[in-house]
Image (cartoon, helix red, strand yellow):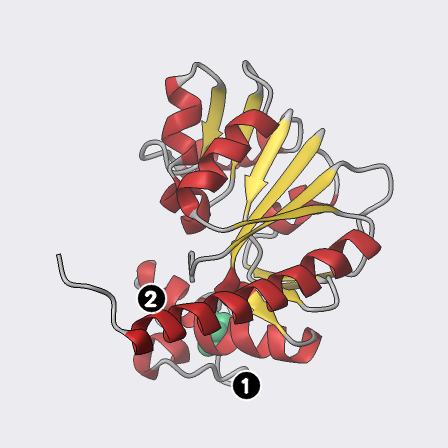
Amino acid sequence: MSEEKNWEIELKQSVDWFIEEKTNRTVEALKKNGFDSFYVSTKAMTLERMLQLIPKGSRVGIAGSMTIRQIGLDDALRKRGDQVDDIWAKKYSMEEQLAVRRRHFDADVFLTSSNAITEDGKLINIDGLGNRVAAMVFGPKKVIIVAGINKIVKDVESGIRRIREVSAPMNVKRFSGETPCTRDGHCDLQICQPPDRHCHILSIIEKRPMKTDTTVVLVGENLGY
Ligand code: SF4
């Protein structure tokens, strides 16, 4: 096995330092805004922490989130026998999909990510249907939001820009949507209109919604869109 070169060690150290500073700042801001929040450096460690955080036998709702699947949480919960309401578990009819989404409001635990998280601790999301942002705000007994460091942005403005310029185009492409962003990767709000448009609801959660139990987990890796 080849020895690590000095510049490789320096590169790793400076990247690790930068990630740690950024995530610590964001975790502290999230806590100030009333959320429970903590940082975990890897996907594997996140899976371990999440399985401790979610009581065995819970009814768990999982939103359409790449991040949750990348961690392997959906499979791990099913494996240990939790009742998982997963919108991607099989090919549902539209009516069944809506029923699964409605059940999420009554879940013991609702799992999702956030399209962007500001360094001053706000959660920014854009939805087409709105079930995800609605369940993030009210309904489930516990909400856990998991996000990679790629989701951290300076402020609300850069968060909205990130969603329109980065996450929404890739996400809409996945659905073979016929929108300006799936043609050349650029969002055009004037031209993009229903029924093709996917971005209908913009949600900014500035503080933990009252009477809710909401945890935000930041992971030191790039996850999701
Ligand atoms: S508004 Fe339309 S063009 Fe812009 S990101 Fe959303 S779907 Fe794409």
What type is the residue that disc 1 sits on?
Gln
220 w.r.t. 197: above or below: above
Q: Residues within 10 Å of mark 1 (few under 14, many from 20)?
A: few
Q: Which percent across, then down, holds residue 212?
A: 79, 38
Q: Which residue is mark 2?
A: 173
Residue located 42% across and 57% down the image? 224
Q: Quadrant of residue 179?
A: bottom left
Q: Quadrant of the C terminus?
A: bottom left
Residue located 47% across and 24% down the image? 84
Closer to the observer: label 2 or label 1? 2
Dot 2 or dot 1, earlier in sequence:
2
Question: Can residue 203 be seen here?
Answer: no
Kind of element beneath mark 1: loop
Choose between 154 and 162: the one closer to the eye. Answer: 154
Query: Residue 190: which disc?
Result: 1
Is 67 situated left or right of 119 in this image?
A: left
